[in-house]
């Protein structure tokens, strides 16, 4: 049997049955009692859990950045600045700039 045929038959059977207007005795009171019996959420526990998850994410990010820093060649801004200053004080560089 095809799924669509089965679905049509089920819909037809559901439409042929009239819905009941009868509600079980004290239905609303039972539902409200169940809702009231649920434990109240602890705001401090929610904040604490969120902060621990954030701390774990920060530690993971720190480890990834540290791994990249160890793997990649050392190329820092201090080395670049030192190299630039050394080039500016080199007389051979100055004389080649004057020729151009």
Image (cartoon, helix red, strand yellow):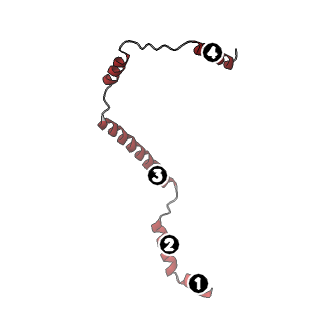
Q: Secondary structure at mark 1?
A: helix
Mark 1 or mark 3, which is nearer the start of the sequence? 3
Q: CA distance from mark 3 to mark 1?
A: 40 Å
Q: CA distance from mark 3 to mark 4?
A: 62 Å
Say which residue label 4 marks.
12
Say which residue label 1 marks.
97
Q: Residue furthest right?
A: 1
Q: Position of residue 95 (x, y in %)?
A: 57, 86
Residue plotted at (55% across, 84% down): 94
Q: Secondary structure at mark 4?
A: helix
Q: Nearer the viewer, residue 59 or 36?
A: 36
Q: Secondary structure at mark 2?
A: helix
Q: Nearer the viewer, mark 2 or mark 3?
A: 3
Mark 3 or mark 2, which is nearer the start of the sequence? 3
Mark 4 or mark 3, which is nearer the start of the sequence? 4
Name the image quarter holding the N terminus.
Answer: top right
Q: Secondary structure at mark 3?
A: helix
**In the picture provided, is 3 more to the left or to the right than 57?**
right
Q: Mark 3 near mark 1, Cβ–Cβ under 8 Å?
A: no
Q: Mark 3 near mark 4, Cβ–Cβ under 8 Å?
A: no
Residue plotted at (50% across, 72% down): 83
Say which residue label 3 marks.
65
Q: Is residue 37 above or below residue 81?
A: above
Q: CA distance from mark 4 to mark 2?
A: 84 Å
Q: Nearer the viewer, residue 60 or 31?
A: 31
How many numbered marks, from 0 up? 4
Residue plotted at (45% across, 68% down): 78
Q: Nearer the viewer, residue 38 or 69?
A: 38
Q: Position of residue 67 (x, y in %)?
A: 48, 50
Q: Mark on residue 83?
A: 2
């Amino acid at each position: 049997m095809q799924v669509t045929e089965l679905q049509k038959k089920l819909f037809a059977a559901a439409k042929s049955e009239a819905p009941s207007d009868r509600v079980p005795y004290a239905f609303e009171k039972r539902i409200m009692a169940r809702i009231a019996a649920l434990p109240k959420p602890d705001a401090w526990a929610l904040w604490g859990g969120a902060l621990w998850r954030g701390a774990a994410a920060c530690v993971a990010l720190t480890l990834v950045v540290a791994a990249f820093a160890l793997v990649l060649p050392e190329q820092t801004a201090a080395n670049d600045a030192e190299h630039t200053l050394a080039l500016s004080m080199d007389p051979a560089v100055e004389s080649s700039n004057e020729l151009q």
